[in-house]
Image (spheres, rainbow, N blue to C red):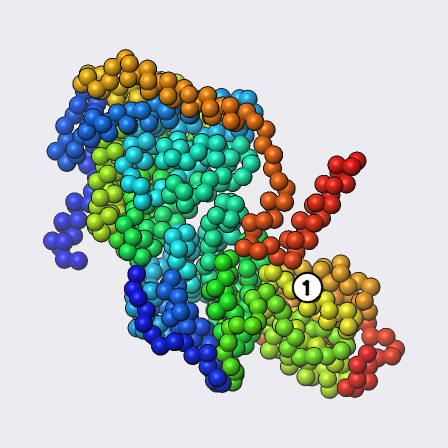
Amino acid sequence: MTAIAEAAPAVSTSDTLTMAGALNRALADALTEDERVLVFGEDVGTLGGVFRVTDGLAARFGEARVFDTPLAEAGIVGTAIGMAMNGLRPVVEMQFDAFAYPAFEQITSHLAKLRNRTHGRVELPIVIRIPYGGGIGGVEHHCDSSEVYYTHTAGLRVVTPSSPADAYALLRQAIDSPDPVIFLEPKRRYWEKETARLDHRGSTLDRAVVRRPGSDVTLISYGGALGTTLQVAEAAQEEGYSAEVIDLRSLSPFDLDTVAASVRRTGRAIVVHEASRFCGYGAEVAAQLSETCFHYLEAPVLRVAGFDIPYPAPNLEQHHLPGVDRILDAIERLQWDDSAPAAGGGA
Amino acid sequence: MTTTERAAASHLLPSADPLGLIAADGSPVPDPALELPDGEVLLRLYQGMVAGRRFDTQATALTKQGRLAVYPSARGQEAAEIGGILALRPQDWLFPTYRDSMAVVARGVDPVEVLTLLRGDWHCGYDPYRANVAPQCTPLATNTLHAVGFAHAARIKGEDSVSLVLLGDGATSEGDTHEALNFAAVWQAPVVFLVQNNGYAISVPLSKQTAAPSLAHKGIGYGMPSVLVDGNDAAAVHAVVEQAVARAAAGEGPTLIEAVTYRVESHTNADDASRYRDRAEVEQWLARDPIARLKHYLTGRGLLDDARQQEIDARAEAEAATLRERMNVDTELDPAELFRHVYAEPTAALRQQAAELTAELTTGNQA
Ligand SMILES: Cc1ncc(C[n+]2csc(CCOP(=O)(O)OP(=O)(O)O)c2C)c(N)n1
């Protein structure tokens, strides 16, 4: 095995970088620290990936560790499974959400189940990175929100960051995880910049985080829709509602504790995501909240989601994706009683 | 690739007829390209096939007693099953399918642990790392990619290990097979694909599965040397797999081998093969029995006498008796196991569901 002699990775102090840059840093640091880590997929080598997330890695770590594969998604995941069985830690890229579907069989029948099938004797520490979701004007098959296909599958962890710092931390932790992780990268947040300290210790892979505290209503979101949800919280403040925003980060396992604690305080909850609503992730959140927080709820748990349609053509996508107004509307629709909160105040 | 190189690619093509070393009547057929395994190896092959068949009939009997939920017999395919396995070195890996229990046992896995899958107790009852055998694969062809990845990893790690993957004729139609052949060839991975062409994918004959002149012909499109071998000739299968393993271990890349054989029983005990094939066809293949063939050869050469035969039979019988005895014990399964191996650590939700099940079982017991 090639020995890797690189400078120790910087857990940087404060850096301004994009989510794509943070992911690139995470891969570079993981490749440096653990020689079992491999990065491969379509166009991830010389090109650095169509979103440049793997930019420069092949040149720095060599073709044996960062390489282009033949164009075959089942092949990428299937061979990753074999490699992981043989002690390596592959991090593979699916070029776009809908192009991961050819690999679905390998993911659901094997990646998710091999630990279980073998009484825990086979461990598959594999990360499948999937740029997902819309909002970038992509043509068809480039914008699917495919999260529930994976969250419905026992044995997989499913995570999605919404900020550069989280992207770094979650990807490092995903690579360290003994379980297979579906790592969903919200495309429309790839280029958003943040000044952040990159660190992957401390936070855990399966915890949600309160992004903005509030007291009247809990807005639960993740990935691409989180930015919109935060904007809504700002706008709602002007309407007199104090909204708490939770970023789930981990879709499976679901951090019910963090979400329920918030909802028990606010009494109202709205789940926001861009995937279709029917049997979508919001349905699970709503069901779990009604089972565990029913007596605290002042109103039904609402879902604001994409329509139940195939992902629309780019010039129509803005009508499909939940925007600020649609989410604000939902806040208005919650059954606020006559003692409706005063501007800036809590319940 | 230049025209000359392209023309030279004909060396990747399989022979027109399956290679063989011992004819159906037991007479030797010398082949300049293949070396007949020595007497010691031939005897091991013979013994392995006798034991394999005894295991197979025992497993079939266990379905009748309700001890196994289902069993896909490999009777008639002993030469391909055993010939291939015995050509492996200890450090090599086997990637078998549901039909290859005989091969898995021959590789040294405890037969009771092999049969947990078919008994319905657990999906894979053995530790893959103990005998270097991947879990038996039920979805068709998916194991081909695992084998390629495993083999490629061995190369990356600088380990001398070759992966042998077993698949059926039907499985060659699956996309995963094509991706695996392509990946293996592009990566020059140390992997050997052994297709057991046993004539049928459940009820569908080979003629409806492919229009290729042979399944081995598929290798050339991927740039991989391919071999067509008589799958009822254990000596020939052993020789070609051994060659392919040596090539792979020497860094010369993968090989595709098609072993032409026949599934003399139904697809599983639940299938009725008389609905899709003639008895006459089966009879024809019974006459090409791989065990009888090698026996003729060995006795003709004085390598096998009655005493040795009795010894081999007795050993197979004893193994079957032990298996029968061990399988006739009711197993106790721990329901808590359901939640234990989903993730490295059970999630909060799984811990709660485990508690719910425990409570349910406790109340159930009290009722
Ligand atoms: C992906 C997939 N599709 C369908 C099946 C159902 N099935 C089980 S065995 C079989 C036929 C397989 O034939 P072949 O590959 O020739 O192997 P054999 O059973 O003859 O050993 C089918 C269709 C399956 N196991 N996996």
User: Is A277 left or right of A195, judged from the image as shown?
Assistant: right
Q: Residue at x 29, y 24 (%)?
A: B46
Q: Residues within 10 Å of mark 1 (few under 14, many from 20)?
A: some
Residue where numbered disc 1 is placed: A256
Say above or below: B69 vs B130: above
Pointer 1 residue Cβ closer than 8 Å to ligand 1: no
User: Is B200 left or right of A280, judged from the image as shown?
Assistant: left
Say above or below: B197 vs B336: above
Q: Quadrant of residue A48?
A: bottom left
**x, y (%) of residue B14?**
21, 39
User: Is A235 left or right of B306, judged from the image as shown?
Assistant: right
User: Is A37 left or right of B41, judged from the image as shown?
Assistant: right
Give the letter of the chain under mark 1.
A
**x, y (%) of residue B217?**
25, 41
Say above or below: A143 vs B281: below
Q: Quadrant of residue A257?
A: bottom right
Q: Answer whether residue B124 is visible to the viewer in this image.
A: yes
**x, y (%) of residue A121?**
48, 48
Q: Amino acid at mark 1?
A: Leu
Q: Which element type, helix, strand or loop, lies under badge 1?
A: helix
Residue farthest toward the top in the current orientation of the protein:
B306
Q: Residue at x 38, y 35 (%)?
A: B108
Image quarter for ligand 1: top left
Look at the image and tell me in which quarter the N terminus of chain A lies.
bottom left
**x, y (%) of residue A301?**
74, 66
Q: Quadrant of residue A333?
A: bottom right
Look at the image and tell me in which quarter the C terminus of chain A lies.
bottom right
Q: Answer whether residue A322 is visible to the viewer in this image.
A: no
Numbered-mark total: 1
Q: Residue at x 41, y 42 (%)?
A: B130
